Amino acid sequence: MELYNKTSFSISKIVTKNYSTSFSLGIAAFAPKYRDAIYGIYAFVRLADEIVDTFHVYDQKKLMRDLRRDTEEALRSGISTNPILQAFVQTVHQYKIDYHYIDAFLKSMEMDLSNSYYEKDEYNEYIYGSAEVVGLMCLKVFCGDDKELFEKLIAPAGSLGSAFQKVNFLRDIKSDMEERERIYLPGINHANKINDESKKNLEQEVEKEFHEALEGIKKLPHGVKLGVYSAYLYYVALFRKIQRLKVKELMKESVRVSNPAKIALLFRGLVEVRLLKLT
């Protein structure tokens, strides 16, 4: 089992690196004891996300039903022949991650297969399940047995996950509408209703959540602070680029932060966390 578990986490690491340069850099900045568990969470989340976002020629609803069934069975039995699920289940058991978070995440993924837009209440539920609980699963890893610290950081961790997700929504307006026929602006149900005012409203939410999240990042354990802060800096940089563009411009171009810029942000984070003592 030791070799199988090690292999499963290695596969989750490969998935993370192949799908996200920014998160891979952030995780690499963690102290070694945290890395495998976060790879395990990311790869599981990515697997579900790929089902709903890219597996269009297959029966996506069936694939999601199968993933939920397989996840629940693996959580009960403690083992899965799917290495990504195996790494995730080992992480869930080791850090006592609440099943409620997993269920909420899977529910949001299922919502994506039947919804093309979201009213405000449903939108908030979707954000909670697709983003906030992922931050809370990671927070369980970061805090370990320190329940008091976990409780203190629940709100800022949720804000960070929500802010990241909303920045993704703004970045991907074009691909979400053209490739997936989805709109992730609350209460907006037609493409012609997306305008700079609705974009600005969402940006105001993001600003507030970034502020709340930063206060929580300052209180994280030293072994993960640099990695999380670097991811925060990356998303803030991406967000600033998006803010400078009109909706019609976002519909024409893909906004990205270059890999050299990501490296520079990592070094900036290193200076601010370790030399300037981000507190």
Image (tube, rainbow, N blue to C red):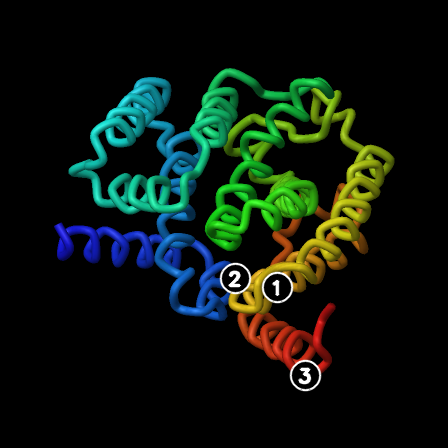
- Is 75 above or below relative to 236? above
Badge 2 marks a residue whose secondary structure is helix
Question: In front: 175, or 12?
Answer: 12
What residue did someone put label 3 on?
275
Badge 3 marks a residue whose secondary structure is helix
Q: Tell me the kind of residue under disc 1.
A: Val
Could you tell which of marks 2 and 1 lies nearer the N-terminus?
Answer: 2
10 Å neighbourhood of mark 2: few (<14), some, or many (≥20)? many
Is residue 140 in sight in this rendering? yes
Q: Work out which residue is located at the far bottom of the displayed protein and give it.
A: 275
- Is 273 above or below relative to 85? below
10 Å neighbourhood of mark 1: few (<14), some, or many (≥20)? some
What residue did someone put label 1 on?
257
Identify the residue at horizontal 73%, vertical 52% (top origin): 242
Q: Tell me the kind of residue under disc 2.
A: Ser
Identify the residue at horizontal 71%, vertical 58% (top origin): 236
> In whole angstroms, how far apart are the C-alphas of marks 2 and 3?
22 Å
- Image position of 259 (left or right of 162): left
- Is 126 above or below relative to 148? above
What residue did someone put label 2 on?
22
Can you give x and y, in whole percent of width and height, for residue 151 in the image? 63, 42
Can you give x and y, in whole percent of width and height, for residue 43 in the image? 37, 47
Nearest to the eye among marks 1 and 3: give it.
3
Could you tell which of marks 2 and 3 lies nearer the N-terminus?
Answer: 2
Question: In front: 136, or 182?
Answer: 136
Identify the residue at horizontal 59%, vertical 27% (top origin): 182
State if disc 1 and disc 2 touch (CB < 8 Å). yes
Badge 1 marks a residue whose secondary structure is loop
State if disc 3 and disc 1 touch (CB < 8 Å). no
> In whole angstroms, how far apart are the C-alphas of marks 1 and 3?
25 Å
Question: In front: 70, or 141?
Answer: 141
